[in-house]
């Protein structure tokens, strides 16, 4: 049906008003706001027990804790949470909104030998209990050497200095920060673990109530009379509890002991608004050092990159200018000292060793680079909220699957360019679809057997293995094959010069060229090693990482430096008549992965000194190897493609007889 031109402005205006009305109060980074009325029951959730000493997560209910009246319920988890070892379950801790109370929970049966051994082991391995209230993790404050430190979670127990006894944490003081929300005409549209929801004007009264904007816990150990306490029913109010400083009044862990669990909750009104409630978690200690180190690194790298870029421009321009002058004068014979790279004109595009492997690694590198860039850009703009657990990893996996079409296209087109024909493209596509995922699956399977042997929740269930295989073979592989097919349809890149039938002899060198290639990785490593420290700390020390804006800058800087380093080394090899530049261009920038892996080992030895046991070290090194492999493929691809187009441009810019 046609619409008159006179009505178009009115329709556009109406659409704009509706858009603004819908977007009023839109809050992207958080989940859907939940308001609670006075006295409304609120139940906490518990996640897996974690430790920075072992890095092996275990189920909360693997220890003799109180269970909910209606049984343990597992919460819905996304793919990222499952892969990270999260196991979120319901708990027995129940609060009533804005009601301060001290409550009895339960008394255990007499602890047997196995339970005592397990509690002692978890205590000495510094395991933390991770609680969640309204999607906020419990935060604990502690003082260490006069410095206030914040942690998420609280310990299972503690071992006093110069003591062989262990004590269990059985009394928790909760401090819940709340903000009174009056439903003042604000519309909230958001997505989170509760799903999508809208609070409209009509729901003002219903939405009025209290928002939870903070969740703090103060743990202690209290010795109770189990016979007296066991007469109480769950959630029965008791007298306020004072945390004792005397060990004789604390609950020791030993056989035949019956442990009583209690808690108290205090609601405190706060001026913190719901959109800002994550700010306390994202404030990392040593923030000034973090910002200063990154800025300092950026300035140094920009300075070095500028020098490399200027030298490169002047050198190449000088060589091209001198050769053009020779060509104009009398088409004189080429001077080897002035333009050594010109001597390899008949060999520079000669087929490299193992061309299929090179094409496969370049295709996978493009896929990993695309996944990293898109993920970090989305995270930098606030789309990856810390409130949505596992969303970052889930997003990365989905992006990787769908970017298979680009990987197949790049790999097959490079194969057609090198070979001059697209014959064998199916084999290249299959290898591209299986190379990096295959490496990851082999490493994860080995680590999974170790986790299964330890009964850890970090082990990937068999059902999840089938899900991952289905995603791999039903999405990634077909898309990679489709990309390969499209690569055969694309026109192959034509080389500007012909390749001689007999390879030119490469002059002997005083030192191996691979030494220079390995050394080239130090410059890209300089751009990311500071950020790498904070990323490793967030992964292995349980800290929040949310400075994706700086990570995006570092990533862009890394791309520039990898490209420049690879181009400069390629040019240096051509100048000494070494025409085997293909793999060297890849590893000139890809060698940064070696330094990343060595730095990971250094971090394990000097910064994760508390990490105990060969199992934990094996897990750490396995995951570090996956990270280093991904970095090698990504940075190597960036350097190789830049060098390829540089060599193509260099030899197509001059007249060659």
Image (cartoon, helix red, strand yellow):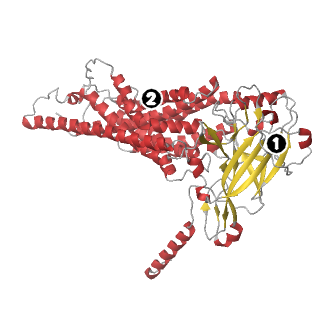
Q: Quadrant of residue 329?
A: top left
Whether residue 460 can be seen here? yes
In this rendering, the answer to whether 2 lies above or below 547 is below
In this rendering, the answer to whether 190 lies above or below 283 is below
Circle 2 packing at 10 Å, graded few (<14), some (14-19), many (20+), is many
Residue under circle 2?
Answer: 595
Residue 396, horizontal then vertical, whole percent: 54, 44
Q: How many marks?
A: 2
Residue 98, horizontal then vertical, whole percent: 74, 59
Front-most of 533 and 456? 533
Residue under circle 1?
Answer: 261
**First in residue order: circle 1 vs circle 2:** 1
Give the residue displayed 74% in from the left and 63% down from the top: 37
Give the residue displayed 11% in from the left and 37% down from the top: 325
Pointer 1 with pointer 2, Cβ within 8 A: no
The quadrant of the image that shows the C terminus is: top left
Whether residue 423 can be seen here? no
Q: Which mark is residue 415?
A: none
Residue 478, horizontal then vertical, whole percent: 53, 42
Front-most of 433 and 591? 591
240 on left or right of 84 = right
Element on which disc 1 rests: strand
In this rendering, the answer to whether 529 lies above or below 191 is above
Q: Quadrant of residue 617?
A: top right
Element on which disc 2 rests: helix
Front-most of 423 and 586? 586
């Amino acid at each position: 049906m046609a619409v008159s031109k006179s009505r178009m402005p009115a329709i556009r205006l109406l659409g704009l008003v509706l858009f603004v009305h819908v977007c009023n109060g839109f809050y992207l980074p958080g989940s859907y706001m939940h308001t609670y009325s006075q006295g409304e029951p609120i139940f906490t959730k518990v996640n897996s027990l974690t430790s920075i000493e072992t890095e092996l997560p275990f189920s909360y209910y693997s220890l003799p804790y109180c269970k909910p009246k209606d049984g343990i319920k597992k919460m819905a988890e996304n793919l990222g949470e499952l892969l990270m070892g999260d196991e979120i379950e319901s708990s027995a801790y129940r609060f009533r909104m804005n009601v301060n109370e001290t409550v009895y929970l339960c008394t255990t049966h007499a602890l047997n030998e196995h339970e005592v051994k397990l509690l002692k082991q978890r205590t000495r391995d510094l395991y933390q209990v991770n609680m969640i209230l309204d999607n906020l993790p419990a935060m604990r404050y502690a003082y260490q050497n006069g410095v206030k430190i914040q942690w998420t979670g609280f310990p299972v127990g503690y071992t006093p200095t110069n003591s062989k006894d262990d004590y269990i944490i059985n009394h928790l003081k909760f401090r819940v920060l709340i903000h009174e929300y009056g439903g003042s005409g604000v519309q909230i549209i958001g997505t989170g673990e509760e799903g999508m929801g809208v609070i409209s004007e009509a729901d003002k009264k219903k939405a009025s109530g209290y928002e939870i904007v903070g969740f703090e816990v103060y743990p202690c150990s209290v010795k109770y009379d189990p016979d007296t306490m066991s007469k109480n029913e769950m959630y029965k109010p008791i007298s306020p509890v004072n945390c004792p400083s005397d060990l004789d009044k604390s609950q020791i862990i030993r056989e035949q002991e019956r442990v009583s669990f209690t808690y108290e909750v205090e609601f405190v009104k706060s001026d913190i608004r719901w959109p800002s409630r994550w700010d306390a978690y994202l404030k990392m200690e040593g923030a000034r050092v973090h910002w200063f180190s990154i800025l300092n690194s950026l300035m140094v790298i920009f300075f070095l990159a500028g020098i490399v870029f200027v030298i490169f421009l002047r050198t190449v321009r000088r060589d091209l200018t001198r050769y053009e002058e020779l060509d104009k004068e009398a088409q004189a014979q080429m001077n080897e000292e002035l333009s050594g790279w010109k001597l390899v004109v008949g060999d520079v595009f000669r087929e490299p060793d193992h061309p299929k492997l090179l094409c496969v690694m370049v295709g996978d590198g493009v896929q990993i680079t695309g996944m990293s860039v898109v993920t970090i850009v989305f995270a930098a703009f606030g789309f990856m909220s810390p409130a949505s657990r596992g969303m970052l990893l889930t997003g990365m996996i989905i992006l990787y699957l769908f970017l298979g079409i680009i990987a197949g296209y790049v790999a097959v087109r490079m194969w057609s360019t090198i070979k001059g024909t697209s014959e064998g493209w199916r084999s290249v596509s299959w290898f591209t679809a299986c190379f990096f995922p295959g490496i990851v699956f082999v490493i994860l399977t080995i680590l999974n057997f170790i986790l299964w042997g330890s009964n850890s929740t970090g082990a990937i269930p068999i059902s999840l293995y089938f899900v991952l295989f289905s995603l791999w073979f039903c999405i990634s592989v077909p898309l990679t094959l489709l990309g390969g097919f499209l690569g055969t349809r694309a026109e192959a890149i034509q080389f500007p010069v012909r390749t001689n039938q007999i390879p030119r002899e490469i002059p002997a060198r005083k030192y191996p060229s691979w030494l220079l290639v390995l050394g080239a990785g130090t410059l890209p490593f300089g751009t990311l090693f500071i950020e790498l420290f904070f990323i490793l700390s967030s992964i292995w020390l349980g800290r929040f990482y949310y400075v994706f804006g700086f990570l995006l800058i570092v990533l862009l800087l890394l791309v520039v430096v990898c490209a420049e380093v690879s181009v400069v080394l390629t040019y240096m090899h051509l100048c000494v008549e070494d025409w085997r530049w293909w793999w060297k261009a890849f590893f000139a920038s890809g060698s940064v992965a070696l330094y990343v892996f060595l730095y990971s080992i250094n971090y394990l030895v000097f910064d994760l000194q508390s990490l105990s046991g060969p199992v934990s070290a094996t897990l750490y090194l396995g995951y570090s190897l996956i990270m280093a492999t991904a970095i090698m493929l990504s940075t190597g691809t960036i350097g190789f493609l830049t060098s390829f187009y540089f060599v193509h441009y260099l030899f197509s810019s001059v007249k060659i007889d």
